[in-house]
Image (cartoon, grey):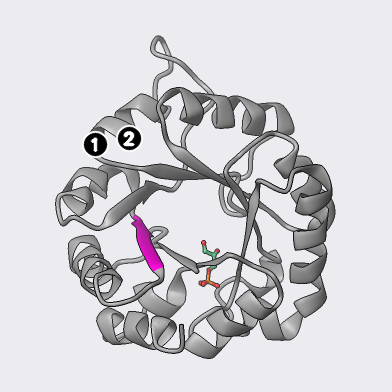
Amino acid sequence: MFVLVNLKTYPCDPVAVAEAVRDVNDRTDARLAVAPQAAHIERVAETGAETWAQHVDPIDYGSNTGHTLAESVAEAGAEGTLLNHSERRLKLADVDGAVRAARRADLETIVCANNPAQIGAAAALGPDAVAVEPPELIGTGTPVSQADPDIVEDAVAAAERVDDDVSVLCGAGISTGEDVVSAGDLGAEGVLLASGVAKADDPQAALEDLVDPL
Ligand SMILES: O=C[C@H](O)COP(=O)(O)O
């Protein structure tokens, strides 16, 4: 299972969380990675943890003030990027452009979507993976795998119909190892989570709990 920890703009110490991600990753068969804010990518990548960007824009080098260039996050040490997160939605044409920009910079891509219909559309754009996240469950601590298991199974089926090379993750409310196992049982190849680690008093213990049953 792939466990991607999105730090959003939570007021945690990104380097301390990254060190915990690195250390727990070294002791499990699961793959762990962390997605800090763009300004923290370089410091986080220097810990040796697999580092992802939270977003890149559908742009190339040039006159794009205030945008995030895929090549810049890759040079800072990111290995992949989230795209179209529920908190950073893009127009369809811009998701397509951002997938292409990320590919140009050799970044792995996960395109987020609200529901199985959007997952099908996202898979058609050729990312490495898609992630289904019902927005109403994000940050609630109620895991999507329990609250809405059908949405995970339907997302897996929707992606498979379009392109069975595209992996499916699920996210929203995932915070325990049991939640990760349930996600896997529903066909997800990974989980996208944030508050369960970024807001934990002890992020390392939270990560250990997440991978313990895997
Ligand atoms: O990117 C992560 C998701 O939005 C899930 O957030 P959460 O784990 O706080 O529910």
Q: Residues within 10 Å of mark 1 (few under 14, many from 20)?
A: some
Between the residue at mark 2 and the residue at mark 1, the CA separation in whole angstroms equals: 5 Å
Label 1 lies in ligand 1 vicinity (Cβ under 8 Å): no
Q: Is residue 183 visible?
A: yes
**On screen, residue 103 above or below 150:** above
Amino acid type at image mark 2: Val
Q: Tell whether position 172 is magenta.
A: no
Rendered residue at 29%/69% (across/down): 25
Quarter assignment of residue 84: top right
Label 2 lies in ligand 1 vicinity (Cβ under 8 Å): no
- Label ID, residue 199: none
- Label ID, residue 73: 2
In terms of depth relative to the viewer, which is nearer, 103 or 61? 103
Q: Position of residue 75 (x, y in %)?
A: 25, 31
Q: Dot 1 lies on which element?
A: helix
Residue marked by disc 1: 76
**On screen, residue 70 above or below 40:** above
In terms of depth relative to the viewer, which is nearer, 32 or 44? 32
Rendered residue at 75%/43% (across/down): 163
Q: Position of residue 70 (x, y in %)?
A: 41, 29
State the predominant SS element of the stretch in magenta: strand
> Is residue 145 shown left or right of residue 44?
right
**On screen, residue 53 above or below 6:** above
Amino acid type at image mark 1: Ala
> Is residue 64 shown left or right of residue 127?
left
Rendered residue at 60%/24% (across/down): 97
**On screen, residue 192 above or below 183:** above
Q: Position of residue 91 (x, y in %)?
A: 70, 34
Q: Are marks 2 and 1 in contact (CB under 8 Å)?
A: yes
Q: Dot 2 lies on which element?
A: helix
Quarter assignment of residue 198: bottom left
Q: Which contiguous range is marked in magenta?
A: 31-35
